[in-house]
Image (cartoon, helix red, strand yellow):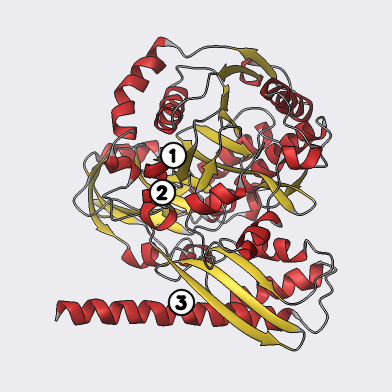
Amino acid sequence: MPSKDKNTVFRVLDSAPRTAAEHMALDKVIMNAHSQGLIPNTMRFLQFKPCVLVGLHQNTFLEVNVPYCQQQGIDINRRITGGGSLYWGPMELGWEIYAAKNTPGIPRKIESMYKLLCEAMALGLKTLGLAAAYRPVNDIEIGGRKIAGTGGTELADSFVFQCSILVDFDIDEMLRVLQFPLEKLSDKAVTSMRERVTSIREQIGYVPEHSKIKSAILTGLREALGYDFCPGELITEETDLLNEYLPYFQSNDWIYGKDSTFINTIDCIANYKAPGGLIRIQMRLDAGIRVIKYLIISGDFFAYPARAINDLETTLKNTPIDEQHIIATINSFFANNPVEIPGIAAEHFINAILLAIEQAKAKTTEVNYEKNKRTL
Amino acid sequence: MSVNKWKFPEDLLYDTHYQWIKRVGDKVLFGLTPYGLNITGDILYLVLPTAGTAVEVGGTCGSLEAGKWVGRVYAPVSGLVTKVNDMVTASPALISQSPYNCWFAEIELSHCAELEGLMSASAIQAWLAEEMEANA
């Protein structure tokens, strides 16, 4: 158990639901204030009015159904952290901690820090009767289905770790709000997504009061890390900074970006016929075809255990697109996991993924050709 | 984890953000050490300032994304960015293969004395050993 010092006592901020822009601006405010030594280590709960949040480097127009969001009054904003886009319903809950990198008990290595804090979160969810567990690299799952995701960033000697929990999640709305590399919004797409995510309501049959969920989270962190949590408020410097930053976080420049450093993406679909059935890959890659951003593997095969496919997808997420790396990753997954899929082996998944990558490359070439033709 | 496991060439300098710095005349090249890479994880995206940007020692001058973590690139010295390694920004996977060959950017020094604030190979090893002990 880490020793008690001022770094292990966290100020807790808990406000009424705010707009996405306010929350995103506050993230920057608290991060800056912490890195300047103005505030103590801080834990913050977040509730949003319905919104969609894209990752720092994402292209909003490729990730979000902007006209639908505008029509429905769903806020769109950009996080200061990386990763993919998220839909936040009115019941979803987030929490984040801002702390010094040298806080007792916090590993310096990012992967280890994710593990520690995700396990603390899983411990908290267990107190609500949920069989939650950490899923590498940065998720919390129940029976192979994601219930919470995490992310983070750093500034000088401070870091922020963020976690979003699905409380009463509306998958149909998420599929309308986000642009997935899925074929049209069919029943299949909804079923496919239901197999991959879950929520507190689905697991225990009701939505607990938010105060109970928050208390469970604090219990998990207290037990796993030995920290203390005391209610607090923003200090004057923070509210001043919020007023200063907010207009930018509400601006189209921030939300839609005019920065050439955004990562554009390309979607591709491939069908590969293996002896045991069809493997269907629906995948999103960055436009430079360097990294697998997101993928859904489906088909008419049977996998045992059923979670094996979700686990394989998670393993392949954020994998660099390098043939040898992909081959090694998939082979290692099948060597280290007891997976049975009649008539389908690791090599078939390798072939299916590589086929999808080829499709993406062909699509890029086609787009470039069309562009060049227009220029001529 | 032991600090001895990591290689810190004698001819380079180091900062507290796990970056290496190489002086070449009145300019420096800098990149991420293997230890820094181990802390962050494989880098998927790297965003650096464009040539001509003025940077200040210790200030952020870029970002890197590894999985769902956004890390920062810090200017090891003050000066003007004179070159950016486009090969590394185009293929950040190269950093994992050869961290000491993958310089991020070249900065023309505006205050040579700032180099004295950086650590030698033996100093960074001592500093890391202390840090590892504190975070054990």
Q: Are marks 1 and 2 in contact (CB under 8 Å)?
A: yes
Q: Secondary structure at mark 2?
A: helix
Residue tagged 2: A68
> Residue B110's spot in the image, x, y percent?
21, 41
Q: Residue at 76% of width from left, 81% of height from top?
A: A345
Query: In the rendered image, which quarter contains the C terminus of chain A?
Result: bottom left
Q: Earlier in the sequence, mark 2 or mark 3?
A: 2
Circle nearer the viewer, 3 or 1: 1
Label whose residue precedes the other's in the sequence (3 or 1): 1
**Picture coordinates of residue A373 (x, y %)?**
20, 82
The label shown at residue B117 is none
Amino acid type for the residue under numbered disc 3? Ala
Task: Tell me the residue that label 3 is attached to.
Answer: A360
Chain for mark 1?
A: A
Which of these two is toward me, B18 or A116?
A: A116
Q: How many marks?
A: 3
- Secondary structure under the numbered disc 1 in the rendered image: loop
Residue A156 relative to residue A137: left or right: left
Secondary structure under tag 3 reads helix
Instruction: Say which quarter of the image contains residue A122.
Output: top right
Chain identity of mark 3: A
Q: Which mark is residue A74?
A: 1
Q: Which of marks 2 and 1 precedes in the sequence?
A: 2
Task: Report the amino acid beneath label 2.
Answer: Tyr
